[in-house]
Image (cartoon, rainbow, N blue to C red):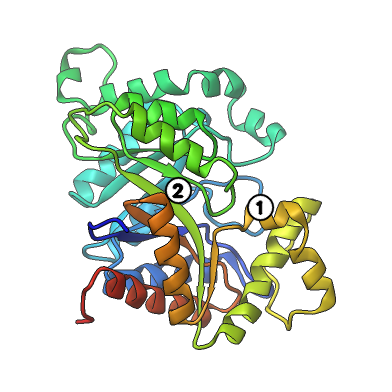
Amino acid sequence: MNPQKITYSILELALVPQGGTIKETLNNSLALAIKAESSNYTRYWFAEHHNADHIGSSATSILIGYVAENTKTIRVGSGGVMLPNHSPLIIAEQFGTLAHLYPNRIDLGLGRAPGTDPQTARAIRSDFMEAAHSFPQEIDKIQKYFSGENKNSKVRATIAEGTDVPLYILGSSTDSAHLAAKKGLPYAFASHFASTHLFHALSIYQQEFQPSEFLKRPYTLAGVNIIVADTDQEAEKLFTTLIQMFFGVLTGSKDALHPPTEMTSELKGMWQHPSLQQMLKYSFVGSKQTVKKQVQEFLAETQANELIAVSTLYAFEDRIKSVELFGEIMMEINGETKQ
Protein backbone atom coordinates (compact mmCIF):
# COMPACT_ATOMS: atom_id res chain seq x y z
CA MET A 1 0.00 0.00 0.00
CA ASN A 2 1.18 3.51 -0.77
CA PRO A 3 2.28 4.91 2.63
CA GLN A 4 1.26 8.42 1.65
CA LYS A 5 -2.27 9.70 2.06
CA ILE A 6 -4.33 9.11 -1.05
CA THR A 7 -6.02 12.12 -2.58
CA TYR A 8 -9.55 11.56 -3.88
CA SER A 9 -11.52 13.63 -6.37
CA ILE A 10 -14.50 13.55 -8.76
CA LEU A 11 -14.83 13.48 -12.55
CA GLU A 12 -18.16 14.91 -13.68
CA LEU A 13 -19.84 14.43 -17.08
CA ALA A 14 -23.18 16.05 -16.16
CA LEU A 15 -25.17 13.04 -17.41
CA VAL A 16 -28.87 13.71 -17.89
CA PRO A 17 -31.21 11.02 -16.51
CA GLN A 18 -34.45 9.97 -18.18
CA GLY A 19 -37.09 12.56 -17.34
CA GLY A 20 -34.48 15.10 -16.33
CA THR A 21 -33.39 18.37 -17.93
CA ILE A 22 -29.98 19.86 -18.64
CA LYS A 23 -30.74 22.75 -16.28
CA GLU A 24 -31.53 20.35 -13.42
CA THR A 25 -28.45 18.30 -14.21
CA LEU A 26 -26.10 21.28 -14.16
CA ASN A 27 -27.61 22.53 -10.91
CA ASN A 28 -27.10 19.05 -9.47
CA SER A 29 -23.48 19.11 -10.63
CA LEU A 30 -22.96 22.15 -8.45
CA ALA A 31 -24.78 20.57 -5.50
CA LEU A 32 -22.57 17.49 -5.86
CA ALA A 33 -19.45 19.67 -5.87
CA ILE A 34 -20.62 21.33 -2.65
CA LYS A 35 -21.12 17.90 -1.06
CA ALA A 36 -17.68 16.80 -2.32
CA GLU A 37 -16.10 19.88 -0.79
CA SER A 38 -17.67 19.15 2.60
CA SER A 39 -16.45 15.53 2.30
CA ASN A 40 -12.81 16.58 1.80
CA TYR A 41 -12.50 15.76 -1.89
CA THR A 42 -9.54 17.57 -3.43
CA ARG A 43 -10.78 18.45 -6.90
CA TYR A 44 -13.86 18.42 -9.12
CA TRP A 45 -13.17 18.03 -12.84
CA PHE A 46 -15.48 18.33 -15.84
CA ALA A 47 -14.93 16.13 -18.91
CA GLU A 48 -15.39 17.72 -22.35
CA HIS A 49 -17.90 15.99 -24.66
CA HIS A 50 -19.71 17.12 -27.80
CA ASN A 51 -22.71 16.04 -29.89
CA ALA A 52 -24.06 13.90 -27.05
CA ASP A 53 -27.77 14.22 -26.38
CA HIS A 54 -27.58 13.53 -22.68
CA ILE A 55 -24.19 14.89 -21.59
CA GLY A 56 -24.08 18.46 -20.32
CA SER A 57 -20.31 18.99 -20.02
CA SER A 58 -19.54 20.49 -23.44
CA ALA A 59 -18.63 24.05 -22.34
CA THR A 60 -16.01 23.02 -19.80
CA SER A 61 -14.57 26.40 -18.79
CA ILE A 62 -18.05 27.85 -18.17
CA LEU A 63 -18.99 24.99 -15.84
CA ILE A 64 -15.68 25.33 -14.00
CA GLY A 65 -16.49 28.99 -13.32
CA TYR A 66 -20.02 28.11 -12.23
CA VAL A 67 -18.78 25.61 -9.65
CA ALA A 68 -15.78 27.65 -8.50
CA GLU A 69 -17.99 30.70 -7.91
CA ASN A 70 -20.30 28.72 -5.63
CA THR A 71 -17.70 26.74 -3.65
CA LYS A 72 -14.86 27.87 -1.42
CA THR A 73 -11.94 25.46 -1.23
CA ILE A 74 -12.27 22.54 -3.63
CA ARG A 75 -10.09 22.72 -6.74
CA VAL A 76 -12.09 22.87 -9.99
CA GLY A 77 -10.85 22.04 -13.44
CA SER A 78 -10.97 20.02 -16.62
CA GLY A 79 -10.60 16.29 -16.94
CA GLY A 80 -10.04 17.29 -19.54
CA VAL A 81 -10.02 19.98 -22.12
CA MET A 82 -9.57 18.12 -25.41
CA LEU A 83 -6.82 20.38 -26.68
CA PRO A 84 -6.95 19.52 -30.42
CA ASN A 85 -10.47 21.00 -30.40
CA HIS A 86 -9.16 24.40 -29.34
CA SER A 87 -6.68 27.15 -29.91
CA PRO A 88 -4.04 26.99 -27.14
CA LEU A 89 -4.16 30.78 -26.96
CA ILE A 90 -7.89 30.80 -26.20
CA ILE A 91 -7.57 28.03 -23.59
CA ALA A 92 -4.77 29.96 -21.89
CA GLU A 93 -6.93 33.08 -21.83
CA GLN A 94 -9.94 31.21 -20.45
CA PHE A 95 -8.05 29.42 -17.69
CA GLY A 96 -5.92 32.46 -16.93
CA THR A 97 -9.13 34.39 -16.37
CA LEU A 98 -10.44 31.65 -14.09
CA ALA A 99 -7.15 31.70 -12.17
CA HIS A 100 -7.53 35.42 -11.46
CA LEU A 101 -11.12 34.96 -10.31
CA TYR A 102 -10.45 31.83 -8.20
CA PRO A 103 -6.74 31.90 -7.20
CA ASN A 104 -4.97 28.60 -6.46
CA ARG A 105 -8.11 26.57 -7.27
CA ILE A 106 -8.05 25.97 -11.04
CA ASP A 107 -6.63 22.85 -12.77
CA LEU A 108 -6.10 22.35 -16.49
CA GLY A 109 -6.20 18.70 -17.53
CA LEU A 110 -5.39 18.23 -21.22
CA GLY A 111 -6.33 15.34 -23.48
CA ARG A 112 -5.67 14.47 -27.11
CA ALA A 113 -8.96 12.74 -28.07
CA PRO A 114 -11.85 14.71 -29.59
CA GLY A 115 -14.47 13.79 -27.01
CA THR A 116 -16.91 13.15 -29.83
CA ASP A 117 -17.37 11.44 -33.21
CA PRO A 118 -15.05 12.15 -36.17
CA GLN A 119 -17.61 14.21 -38.11
CA THR A 120 -18.25 16.48 -35.13
CA ALA A 121 -14.51 16.76 -34.47
CA ARG A 122 -14.07 18.10 -38.01
CA ALA A 123 -16.96 20.52 -37.46
CA ILE A 124 -15.29 21.81 -34.29
CA ARG A 125 -11.92 22.23 -35.99
CA SER A 126 -11.28 21.42 -39.63
CA ASP A 127 -7.61 20.62 -38.95
CA PHE A 128 -8.37 18.40 -35.95
CA MET A 129 -6.17 15.50 -37.05
CA GLU A 130 -3.19 17.80 -37.60
CA ALA A 131 -3.76 19.34 -34.16
CA ALA A 132 -4.03 15.89 -32.56
CA HIS A 133 -0.70 14.84 -34.04
CA SER A 134 0.78 18.11 -32.78
CA PHE A 135 -0.50 17.57 -29.22
CA PRO A 136 2.98 17.84 -27.59
CA GLN A 137 3.69 21.08 -29.44
CA GLU A 138 0.23 22.43 -28.53
CA ILE A 139 1.02 21.81 -24.86
CA ASP A 140 4.30 23.70 -25.33
CA LYS A 141 2.26 26.65 -26.57
CA ILE A 142 -0.02 26.49 -23.51
CA GLN A 143 3.00 26.48 -21.21
CA LYS A 144 4.54 29.39 -23.07
CA TYR A 145 1.35 31.46 -22.77
CA PHE A 146 1.21 30.84 -19.01
CA SER A 147 4.87 31.73 -18.57
CA GLY A 148 5.77 35.12 -17.16
CA GLU A 149 8.65 35.22 -19.64
CA ASN A 150 6.19 35.38 -22.54
CA LYS A 151 5.55 39.10 -21.97
CA ASN A 152 8.12 40.02 -24.64
CA SER A 153 6.55 37.79 -27.30
CA LYS A 154 4.50 39.17 -30.17
CA VAL A 155 1.64 36.74 -29.40
CA ARG A 156 0.54 36.79 -25.77
CA ALA A 157 -2.25 35.55 -23.53
CA THR A 158 -1.64 38.44 -21.17
CA ILE A 159 -4.27 37.43 -18.63
CA ALA A 160 -2.65 34.00 -18.24
CA GLU A 161 0.95 35.10 -17.80
CA GLY A 162 2.33 34.14 -14.40
CA THR A 163 -0.91 32.61 -13.11
CA ASP A 164 -0.86 29.37 -11.12
CA VAL A 165 -2.75 26.81 -13.23
CA PRO A 166 -1.24 23.31 -12.88
CA LEU A 167 -1.29 21.19 -16.04
CA TYR A 168 -2.20 17.49 -16.07
CA ILE A 169 -1.79 15.10 -19.01
CA LEU A 170 -4.73 12.74 -19.56
CA GLY A 171 -4.59 9.44 -21.39
CA SER A 172 -6.26 6.11 -22.07
CA SER A 173 -3.32 4.42 -23.80
CA THR A 174 0.46 4.54 -23.49
CA ASP A 175 1.17 7.52 -25.79
CA SER A 176 0.39 10.18 -23.21
CA ALA A 177 2.36 8.32 -20.54
CA HIS A 178 5.56 8.95 -22.50
CA LEU A 179 4.60 12.60 -22.96
CA ALA A 180 3.67 13.26 -19.32
CA ALA A 181 6.92 11.63 -18.17
CA LYS A 182 9.04 13.63 -20.62
CA LYS A 183 7.44 16.92 -19.62
CA GLY A 184 7.51 16.17 -15.89
CA LEU A 185 3.75 16.66 -15.45
CA PRO A 186 1.12 14.72 -13.46
CA TYR A 187 -0.49 11.87 -15.38
CA ALA A 188 -4.17 10.91 -15.19
CA PHE A 189 -5.26 7.58 -16.69
CA ALA A 190 -8.87 6.98 -17.76
CA SER A 191 -9.12 3.52 -16.20
CA HIS A 192 -12.81 4.07 -15.44
CA PHE A 193 -13.53 3.08 -19.05
CA ALA A 194 -10.16 2.08 -20.59
CA SER A 195 -8.54 -0.52 -18.39
CA THR A 196 -6.42 -2.42 -20.93
CA HIS A 197 -3.23 -0.36 -20.82
CA LEU A 198 -3.39 0.92 -17.23
CA PHE A 199 -0.41 -0.91 -15.77
CA HIS A 200 1.76 -0.57 -18.85
CA ALA A 201 1.08 3.17 -19.00
CA LEU A 202 1.80 3.66 -15.31
CA SER A 203 5.04 1.70 -15.65
CA ILE A 204 6.16 3.82 -18.60
CA TYR A 205 5.38 7.02 -16.75
CA GLN A 206 7.21 5.95 -13.60
CA GLN A 207 10.29 4.69 -15.45
CA GLU A 208 10.64 7.60 -17.88
CA PHE A 209 9.65 10.47 -15.56
CA GLN A 210 11.91 13.51 -15.75
CA PRO A 211 11.67 16.00 -12.86
CA SER A 212 10.61 19.49 -13.91
CA GLU A 213 9.99 22.89 -12.39
CA PHE A 214 6.36 21.79 -12.01
CA LEU A 215 6.83 18.36 -10.44
CA LYS A 216 9.81 16.72 -8.72
CA ARG A 217 8.42 13.18 -8.47
CA PRO A 218 5.88 11.20 -10.53
CA TYR A 219 2.24 11.80 -9.65
CA THR A 220 -0.48 9.51 -10.97
CA LEU A 221 -4.25 9.78 -10.95
CA ALA A 222 -6.51 6.83 -11.82
CA GLY A 223 -10.16 6.97 -12.83
CA VAL A 224 -12.50 4.48 -11.14
CA ASN A 225 -16.25 3.93 -11.14
CA ILE A 226 -17.60 4.18 -7.60
CA ILE A 227 -21.06 3.14 -6.41
CA VAL A 228 -21.49 2.91 -2.64
CA ALA A 229 -24.77 2.21 -0.86
CA ASP A 230 -25.90 0.85 2.50
CA THR A 231 -25.76 -2.75 1.27
CA ASP A 232 -24.09 -4.72 -1.50
CA GLN A 233 -27.50 -5.63 -2.91
CA GLU A 234 -28.63 -2.01 -3.12
CA ALA A 235 -25.36 -0.93 -4.77
CA GLU A 236 -25.56 -3.76 -7.31
CA LYS A 237 -29.04 -2.62 -8.27
CA LEU A 238 -27.79 0.96 -8.72
CA PHE A 239 -24.99 -0.44 -10.87
CA THR A 240 -27.51 -1.54 -13.51
CA THR A 241 -27.74 2.09 -14.66
CA LEU A 242 -24.03 2.10 -15.53
CA ILE A 243 -24.27 -1.30 -17.22
CA GLN A 244 -27.11 -0.06 -19.43
CA MET A 245 -25.24 3.16 -20.25
CA PHE A 246 -22.06 1.41 -21.38
CA PHE A 247 -23.98 -1.25 -23.28
CA GLY A 248 -25.62 1.66 -25.10
CA VAL A 249 -22.15 3.02 -25.90
CA LEU A 250 -21.19 -0.35 -27.42
CA THR A 251 -24.39 -0.58 -29.46
CA GLY A 252 -24.57 3.06 -30.57
CA SER A 253 -27.54 4.01 -28.38
CA LYS A 254 -27.68 7.58 -27.06
CA ASP A 255 -30.35 7.16 -24.41
CA ALA A 256 -30.48 9.21 -21.23
CA LEU A 257 -29.54 7.43 -18.00
CA HIS A 258 -31.95 4.57 -17.28
CA PRO A 259 -33.35 4.07 -13.79
CA PRO A 260 -31.89 1.08 -11.92
CA THR A 261 -33.69 -2.25 -12.02
CA GLU A 262 -33.27 -5.68 -10.54
CA MET A 263 -30.46 -7.67 -12.19
CA THR A 264 -32.52 -9.47 -14.84
CA SER A 265 -31.21 -12.25 -17.05
CA GLU A 266 -31.01 -9.69 -19.88
CA LEU A 267 -28.87 -7.36 -17.77
CA LYS A 268 -26.68 -10.25 -16.69
CA GLY A 269 -26.15 -11.02 -20.35
CA MET A 270 -25.16 -7.40 -21.01
CA TRP A 271 -22.75 -7.44 -18.07
CA GLN A 272 -21.09 -10.66 -19.30
CA HIS A 273 -20.23 -9.06 -22.64
CA PRO A 274 -16.38 -9.23 -22.83
CA SER A 275 -16.02 -5.64 -24.03
CA LEU A 276 -18.22 -4.35 -21.22
CA GLN A 277 -16.33 -6.40 -18.65
CA GLN A 278 -13.07 -4.88 -19.89
CA MET A 279 -14.39 -1.31 -19.97
CA LEU A 280 -15.87 -1.47 -16.48
CA LYS A 281 -13.14 -3.60 -14.90
CA TYR A 282 -12.36 -0.93 -12.32
CA SER A 283 -15.87 -0.45 -11.00
CA PHE A 284 -16.07 -0.69 -7.23
CA VAL A 285 -19.62 -1.43 -6.20
CA GLY A 286 -21.09 -2.31 -2.81
CA SER A 287 -21.35 -1.31 0.81
CA LYS A 288 -18.65 0.75 2.51
CA GLN A 289 -16.91 -2.40 3.71
CA THR A 290 -16.95 -4.01 0.26
CA VAL A 291 -15.79 -0.92 -1.64
CA LYS A 292 -13.09 -0.14 0.91
CA LYS A 293 -11.54 -3.57 0.33
CA GLN A 294 -11.74 -3.18 -3.46
CA VAL A 295 -10.14 0.27 -3.33
CA GLN A 296 -7.34 -0.88 -1.04
CA GLU A 297 -6.51 -3.73 -3.43
CA PHE A 298 -6.51 -1.34 -6.40
CA LEU A 299 -4.22 1.12 -4.62
CA ALA A 300 -1.84 -1.67 -3.63
CA GLU A 301 -1.65 -2.84 -7.26
CA THR A 302 -1.32 0.58 -8.93
CA GLN A 303 0.39 2.71 -6.27
CA ALA A 304 -1.75 5.58 -7.59
CA ASN A 305 -1.40 8.88 -5.76
CA GLU A 306 -4.98 9.93 -6.40
CA LEU A 307 -8.33 8.39 -7.32
CA ILE A 308 -10.72 10.20 -9.63
CA ALA A 309 -14.16 8.82 -8.86
CA VAL A 310 -16.93 8.66 -11.46
CA SER A 311 -20.37 8.17 -9.92
CA THR A 312 -22.90 7.27 -12.62
CA LEU A 313 -26.24 6.88 -10.86
CA TYR A 314 -29.76 7.68 -12.00
CA ALA A 315 -31.14 9.39 -8.90
CA PHE A 316 -29.32 12.43 -7.59
CA GLU A 317 -29.90 11.48 -3.97
CA ASP A 318 -28.11 8.18 -4.64
CA ARG A 319 -25.14 10.08 -6.12
CA ILE A 320 -24.97 12.35 -3.09
CA LYS A 321 -25.02 9.40 -0.73
CA SER A 322 -22.41 7.46 -2.72
CA VAL A 323 -20.07 10.46 -2.81
CA GLU A 324 -20.47 10.98 0.93
CA LEU A 325 -19.85 7.30 1.75
CA PHE A 326 -16.84 7.13 -0.55
CA GLY A 327 -15.42 10.18 1.20
CA GLU A 328 -15.78 8.32 4.49
CA ILE A 329 -14.03 5.28 2.99
CA MET A 330 -11.08 7.36 1.84
CA MET A 331 -10.78 9.10 5.20
CA GLU A 332 -10.64 5.66 6.85
CA ILE A 333 -7.99 4.47 4.38
CA ASN A 334 -5.97 7.62 5.11
CA GLY A 335 -6.34 7.13 8.86
CA GLU A 336 -8.38 10.30 9.28
CA THR A 337 -11.48 10.88 11.37
CA LYS A 338 -14.67 12.56 10.22
CA GLN A 339 -14.93 16.16 11.38
Q: With 248 as the anchor, is 167 left or right in this view?
A: left
Q: Position of residue 164 (x, y in %)?
A: 19, 40
Cβ atoms under marks 1 and 2 closer than 8 Å: no
Three-letter code, disc 2: Thr
- Residue 39, visible in the rendered structure: no
Q: Which of 172 and 29 is in front in this view?
A: 172
The 10 Å Cα crowd at callout 1, few under 14, some 14 to 19, many 20 or more, is some
Q: Residue at x 18, y 49 (%)?
A: 103
Q: Nearer the viewer, residue 319 or 325?
A: 325
Quadrant assignment for the C terminus = bottom left
Q: Residue at x 16, y 32 (%)?
A: 162
* Above or below 275: residue 234: below
Q: Which of 231 and 157 is in front in this view?
A: 231
The disc label shown at residue 278, or none = 1
- Residue 292, visible in the rendered structure: yes
Q: Is mark 2 on a helix, strand or loop?
A: helix
Q: Where is residue 101 in the image (x, y as percent from the top left)?
A: 22, 50
Q: Nearer the viewer, mark 1 or mark 2?
A: 1
Q: Is mark 1 on a helix, strand or loop?
A: helix
Q: Residue furthest bottom?
A: 230
Q: Earlier in the sequence, mark 1 or mark 2?
A: 2
User: What residue is pinned by disc 2?
Assistant: 60
Q: How many marks?
A: 2
Cα separation, mark 1 vs mark 2, equals: 28 Å
Q: Where is residue 187 in the image (x, y as percent from the top left)?
A: 38, 39
Three-letter code, disc 1: Gln
Quadrant assignment for the N terminus = bottom left
